[in-house]
Amino acid sequence: MLSETTVSLLSNLCCCIRQRAFVTSYCIQSRRVHHYPLQVRAALDKKKEEAAAVKEELPSLDIYGCLRDIKYSPLKLNMIAAQIRRLKIQDALVQMEFSEKSGAKFIKQVLEETQEKAVKSYFVSDPNNLFVELSYVGKGQYIRDIKYHGKGRCGIMHHKYSHYFLVLREGSPPVKKKKEDHPIYITRKLIMKGPRSIPNAL
C-alpha cells in the first residue's frame, strides 16, 4: 500500500502534467497561420522545384584569370570591369576593343589570356562558349609621394595600383529573370484588386 505522502505527490504531478499539456495545446492553436491563395502556393512550389533542379545540375567549369599591380585607379578600373559582367566572351572583347578608356587594354589582355588558358589547360572544345561570370577589381598598393606647390608649400600625391580578377564560366550566360513579388504582397494585390479611381471624386 502506498503512503499518503506518495499519493499526494503523484496527484500533484498529474495535475502539473495536465496543466502543461493544456498550455502547450493552447499556444499551438493560438499561433498565427498564413493561408495563401492557390496562385501564391503555385508560385512557391515552382520556386522550390527550380531550387531542387539547380542543386541536381552538375557544377560548371570555371576558369580564373588575374592581372596584378596595374598602374590605374581601382575606382576607375572597376567601372570598366562592370561593363562586361554576364556577357559572352566575344561581346566582352568587342566592348574592350572599342572602349575609349585606357584601362580597357588591361581587361582585354586578361580576357584573351584566360580564353587561351581555357583551351590549353582545361581542354575546352569551343573557346567561344564562355561567358564572364565575375569581373571585379581589388585595391593594390598606394605609394605616397611629395606634390610640390608654389611658395615653398607641398602636399601628398598618391600613386594608385590595382588588381584585376576575372572568372570565365563555360556555357551561355543566364537569362535575367523578372523580380517576382513576395507572396504577402501578392495576397494584398489580390485582396485589394478593384478600381483605383473613385468615381465623382476630386
Image (cartoon, grey):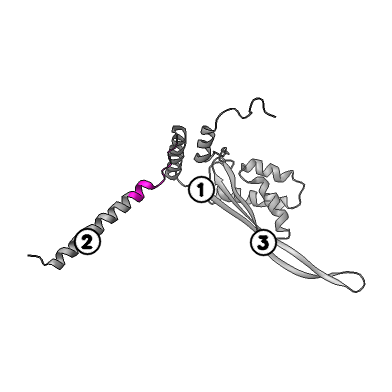
Which callout, 2 or 1, points at the residue further toward the start of the chain? 2
70 vs 10, left or right, is right
Q: Which residues are magenta?
A: 26-36
Q: Vertical placement of 126 versus 25: above or below?
A: above
Q: Vertical placement of 171 versus 136: above or below?
A: above
Q: Quadrant of the N terminus?
A: bottom left
- Amino acid type at circle 1 is Leu
- Amino acid type at circle 3 is Lys
Q: Which residue is mark 2?
A: 13
87 vs 22, left or right, is right
> Which residue is farthest right?
151
Which callout, 2 or 3, points at the residue further toward the start of the chain? 2
- Identified at 28% across, 53% down, the residue is 21
Q: Which mark is residue 61?
A: 1
Choose mark 1 or mark 3, whichever is in front.
3
Q: CA distance from mark 2 to mark 3?
A: 68 Å
84 vs 10, left or right, is right
Choose mark 2 or mark 1, whichever is in front.
2
Which callout, 1 or 3, points at the residue further toward the start of the chain? 1
Q: Secondary structure at mark 3?
A: strand
